[in-house]
Image (cartoon, coloured by chain):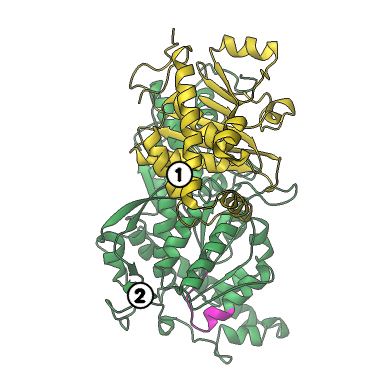
Chain colours: A green, B yellow
C-alpha cells in the first residue's frame, strides 16, 4: 500500500542545464514544461489518435525513434517518419522485428538519447524480453502500446490483455482513455520517466482503433513549443560504463556466480526498480492533473471502475442509466504502475457494488482491484469482452440492472 | 406522416453505421461526415472497423454525432442510421452483423446503394414493424455520371445521408471535403493507394473537389426530396 503523496502545488522538475527559450528542432522553442502543459494557450484540433501521437512527438524534442509495422500502430510509426523527414528527429529507421526495435531503442538510450517507439499486441509480446532489460538498465524509453488482441486466433482489434504482461516488467504503465490523455501523457511521460529518482521506461498504453483510428477533438498548444531536451547527466546510473551496474551486470551475468552476493545484487536491484516506480507517484500526479485516478459521484452505491476506453463505455452507460433514474459513480484509473492503491481504497469506501468493465478475457484489472480493497466481494469482474469485440454501453447497463434485480430485455436477436 | 421518435431538441445522439466493401471509401465517408459535424460545432467522432485491408472484403465505419461530448467507441451495435455502400453487403452477407440491419433502432433509417429492391418480404415486414424507413438510391450511377468515376460512390452516399437526416449541411461537407482531399493526408498504405487512385482520375485537385462535391450535392437534393414524402423524421438537435 502506498502512502498518499500530495501532488498539489508541485512543479515538473527538469534539468538546470536547459536553456528555456532557446531554439528547439525546426521552428520550435524550448519551453518550461510547466508553462507548456498548464499555461500555454491551446487550440482545438480534430485528429485521429495516430495524428495525435505525431503532434505530441513533434513537440517532444525527441532524438530518435525506431519503427516496425504492426496494426494498429503502423500509421503512427509512419507519421513519426514524416517528422524525421521534416527534421524534428535526429535519427529514425525501421528495425528488423519488434525484438530488434526494442534492442535498438536500448542502444540509443544507453548512449544518452531520448527515444520513443510504438508497438501492439503480438509485437509487444515479441519484444517482451527487452522491457525488463530497459527497466533494469534504467533507460527512460517511452513505448506507446496501442493495445491489440494477442494470437491465436488472430485479431487486429483492441484487446488489453497485453497490458497484463507489462505490469511486472519494471516499467511505468499508464493507460490513456482519450486522444487528449494520449497527447498530454506522451509529453508528460518523458518528464516523469526521466526524473533522476525514477529513470525508468514508460509503457504508455491506449486502445487500438478506439483511440488510434478514431477522430476526436484534442487541445494542442497554439505556440510552437517543445520540451526541454533530455539531459543524460541526470541519470542515476552512469551511461554505458562496463565496470559498474547496471551494464556490469550484463557483462558479468550473475548466473556465472551462484552465491548469495549475486542473488542479493539481483534482488536488491529489482527492489530498487520497484522503489523507483513508487517514487514516480509524486511526479506522475503533477502531469495527470493531481491524482492517479479521476472520480465522479463517489457517494453512489454502485461504481464503475476501469481504465482506457472501458471507462468511456462506462461514461455512456452512466448517461443511459441516468435517463432511467439509476445513479452510478465512476473511477478512472490512469496509472497502472504505479497502481493507485490508497486512492482506490478511499474512492470506493462507500460503494456497495463495484463493476470493472474490461476489454480482455482475463479480467486482470478486476484482480488488481480486488487485491487492494477491503470487502472485495463487492467487486464484480465484468462485463468483459475480448478479441476486439465492442462493449456497447447498453451491455454495461444490462449487467447493472440485472444486479439490481430489474427486468432486462434480451440484447440478441434485435432487428 | 412522420414518426416522431425524438421530439425537437431531445435527441442526444445520432449513430450512423456504414457497411461497405474494402476500397469503397466507407472509412473516408465516416471521416468526412464527422469532420463536417465538427465544423458545425457539434460533437462527433468517427472510427473504422475492418480486418486485413483488402478490396471487396467487408469494411465498416461508424459516425457518432451529438450535442455533448461523445465517449462511445467501437462497433456500432444499435444505430439510428445504416448506410449500405454495396449490394453485396446484403446479397452476399458481407456485413459484420446478420442480418445487416441487426440492432437498428425503432424509427431508424436505412440508405442502400442500389437500383432494385434488395430486401426480402420478411425483411420488409420486420423493418415495418420497427417503423424503420428504407431509401434506395443508385449512388454508383450518380457517381459515374457526375463524379466521372465509381470511386465517388461514397460521396453520393454522404450526400444522401445528409439529405435524409440533416445531421450535417452542404457548406460543412464542402469544408470537410476540402480539408480531407485539399491537403496532404497520411493514412494507412491501403488508404494512401486509394487516395492516389482517385487523384489520378482528375487533371487537377480543384476538379476532384468540385466533381465530388457536385456528386454529393445531387444526392443531397434527391434525398431531401424523398424524405419530404417519407415517414422519416430528420434529426433535430
The residue nearer to you, when weighing B212 against A316, is B212
User: Quadrant location of the C terminus of chain A?
Assistant: top right
Disc 2 chain ID: A
Q: Which residue is mark 1?
A: B177
* Residue shown at 51% from the left, 35% from the top: B215
Q: Say which quadrant the N terminus of chain A sits in.
A: bottom left
- Asked if badges 2 and 1 are on one and the same chain, I answer no
Residue A48 visible to an observer of this rendering: no
* Res. B146 mark: none
Q: CA distance from mark 2 to mark 1?
A: 38 Å
The answer to if A114 sits in the magenta stretch is yes
Percent x, y of residue A216: 43, 46
| Residue plotted at (32% across, 81% down) | A18
Residue at left offset 42%, top offset 67% = A58
Horizontal side of residue A410 vs A233, given as left or right: right
Disc 2 secondary structure class: loop
Q: Quadrant of residue A324?
A: top left
Residue A224 is situated, as x and y percent measured from the top left of the image, at 32, 67
What residue sits right under mark 2 in the picture? A228
Q: Position of residue B88 (x, y in %)?
A: 71, 30
Name the quadrant containing residue A299. Answer: top left
| Closer to us: B20 or B226 | B226
Specify the segment rendered in magenta.
A107-116
Q: Is residue A347 above or below residue A274?
A: above
Q: Mark yes or no: residue A156 visible.
A: yes
Q: Is residue B213 left or right of residue A98?
A: left
Query: Mark 1 belongs to which subunit?
Result: B
Dot 1 falls on a residue whose secondary structure is helix
Residue A103 drawn above or below residue A278: below
Amino acid at each position: 500500500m502506498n502512502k498518499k503523496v500530495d501532488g498539489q502545488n508541485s512543479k515538473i522538475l527538469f534539468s538546470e542545464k536547459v536553456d528555456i527559450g532557446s531554439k528547439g528542432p525546426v521552428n520550435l522553442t524550448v519551453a518550461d514544461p510547466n508553462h507548456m502543459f498548464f499555461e500555454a494557450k491551446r487550440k482545438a484540433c480534430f485528429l485521429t489518435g495516430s495524428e495525435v501521437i505525431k503532434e505530441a512527438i513533434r513537440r517532444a524534442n525527441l532524438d530518435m525513434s525506431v519503427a516496425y509495422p504492426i496494426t494498429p500502430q503502423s500509421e503512427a510509426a509512419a507519421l513519426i517518419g514524416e517528422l524525421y523527414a521534416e527534421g524534428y528527429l535526429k535519427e529514425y529507421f525501421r528495425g528488423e522485428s519488434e525484438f530488434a526495435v526494442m534492442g535498438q531503442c536500448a542502444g540509443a538510450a544507453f548512449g544518452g538519447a531520448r527515444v520513443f517507439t510504438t508497438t501492439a499486441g503480438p509485437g509487444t509480446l515479441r519484444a517482451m524480453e527487452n522491457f525488463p532489460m530497459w527497466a533494469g538498465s534504467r533507460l527512460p524509453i517511452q513505448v506507446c502500446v496501442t493495445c491489440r488482441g494477442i494470437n491465436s486466433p488472430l485479431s487486429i482489434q483492441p484487446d488489453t490483455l497485453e497490458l497484463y504482461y507489462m505490469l511486472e516488467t519494471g516499467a511505468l504503465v499508464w493507460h490513456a482513455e482519450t486522444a487528449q490523455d494520449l497527447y498530454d501523457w506522451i509529453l508528460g511521460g518523458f518528464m516523469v520517466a526521466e526524473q533522476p529518482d525514477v529513470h525508468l521506461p514508460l509503457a504508455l498504453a491506449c486502445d487500438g482503433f478506439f483511440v488510434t483510428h478514431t477522430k476526436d477533438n484534442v487541445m494542442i498548444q497554439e505556440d510552437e513549443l517543445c520540451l526541454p531536451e533530455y539531459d543524460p547527466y541526470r541519470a542515476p546510473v552512469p551511461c554505458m560504463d562496463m565496470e559498474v551496474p547496471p551494464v556490469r551486470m550484463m557483462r558479468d551475468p550473475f548466473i556465472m556466480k551462484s552465491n548469495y552476493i549475486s542473488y542479493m545484487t539481483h534482488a536488491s536491484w529489482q527492489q530498487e526498480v520497484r522503489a523507483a516506480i513508487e517514487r514516480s507517484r509524486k511526479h506522475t500526479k503533477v502531469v495527470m492533473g493531481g491524482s492517479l485516478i479521476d472520480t465522479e459521484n463517489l457517494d453512489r452505491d454502485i461504481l464503475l471502475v476501469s481504465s482506457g476506453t472501458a471507462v468511456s463505455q462506462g461514461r455512456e452507460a452512466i448517461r443511459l442509466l441516468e435517463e432511467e433514474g439509476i445513479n452510478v459513480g465512476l473511477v478512472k484509473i490512469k496509472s497502472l504502475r504505479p497502481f493507485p492503491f490508497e486512492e482506490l481504497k478511499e474512492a470506493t469506501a462507500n460503494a456497495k457494488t463495484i463493476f470493472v468493465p474490461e476489454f480482455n478475457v482475463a479480467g486482470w484489472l478486476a484482480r488488481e482491484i480486488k487485491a487492494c480493497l477491503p470487502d472485495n466481494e463487492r467487486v464484480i469482474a465484468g462485463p468483459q469482452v475480448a478479441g476486439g469485440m465492442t462493449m456497447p454501453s447498453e451491455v454495461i447497463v444490462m449487467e447493472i440492472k440485472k444486479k439490481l434485480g430489474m427486468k432486462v430485455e434480451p440484447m440478441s436477436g434485435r432487428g | 406522416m412522420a414518426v416522431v421518435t425524438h421530439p425537437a431538441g431531445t435527441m442526444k445522439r445520432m449513430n450512423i453505421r456504414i457497411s461497405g466493401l474494402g476500397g469503397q471509401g466507407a472509412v473516408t465517408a465516416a471521416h468526412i461526415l464527422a469532420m463536417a459535424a465538427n465544423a458545425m460545432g457539434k460533437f462527433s467522432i468517427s472510427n473504422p472497423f475492418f480486418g486485413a485491408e483488402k478490396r471487396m472484403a467487408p469494411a465498416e465505419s461508424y459516425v457518432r454525432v451529438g450535442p455533448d461530448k461523445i465517449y462511445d467507441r467501437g462497433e456500432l451495435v444499435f444505430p439510428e442510421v445504416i448506410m449500405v455502400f454495396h449490394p453485396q453487403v446484403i446479397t452476399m452477407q458481407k456485413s459484420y452483423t446478420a442480418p445487416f440491419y441487426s440492432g437498428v433502432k425503432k424509427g431508424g433509417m436505412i440508405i442502400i446503394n442500389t437500383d432494385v429492391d434488395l430486401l426480402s418480404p420478411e425483411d420488409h415486414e420486420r423493418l415495418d414493424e420497427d417503423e424503420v424507413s428504407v431509401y434506395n438510391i443508385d449512388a454508383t450511377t450518380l457517381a459515374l455520371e457526375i463524379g466521372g468515376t465509381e470511386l465517388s460512390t461514397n460521396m453520393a452516399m454522404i450526400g444522401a445521408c445528409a439529405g435524409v437526416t440533416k445531421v450535417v449541411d452542404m457548406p460543412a461537407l464542402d469544408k470537410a471535403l476540402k480539408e480531407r482531399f485539399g491537403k496532404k493526408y497520411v493514412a494507412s498504405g491501403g488508404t494512401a493507394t486509394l487516395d492516389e487512385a482517385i487523384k489520378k482520375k482528375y487533371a487537377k485537385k480543384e476538379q476532384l473537389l468540385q466533381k465530388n462535391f457536385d456528386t454529393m450535392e445531387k444526392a443531397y437534393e434527391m434525398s431531401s426530396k424523398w424524405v419530404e414524402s417519407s415517414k422519416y423524421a430528420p434529426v433535430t438537435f
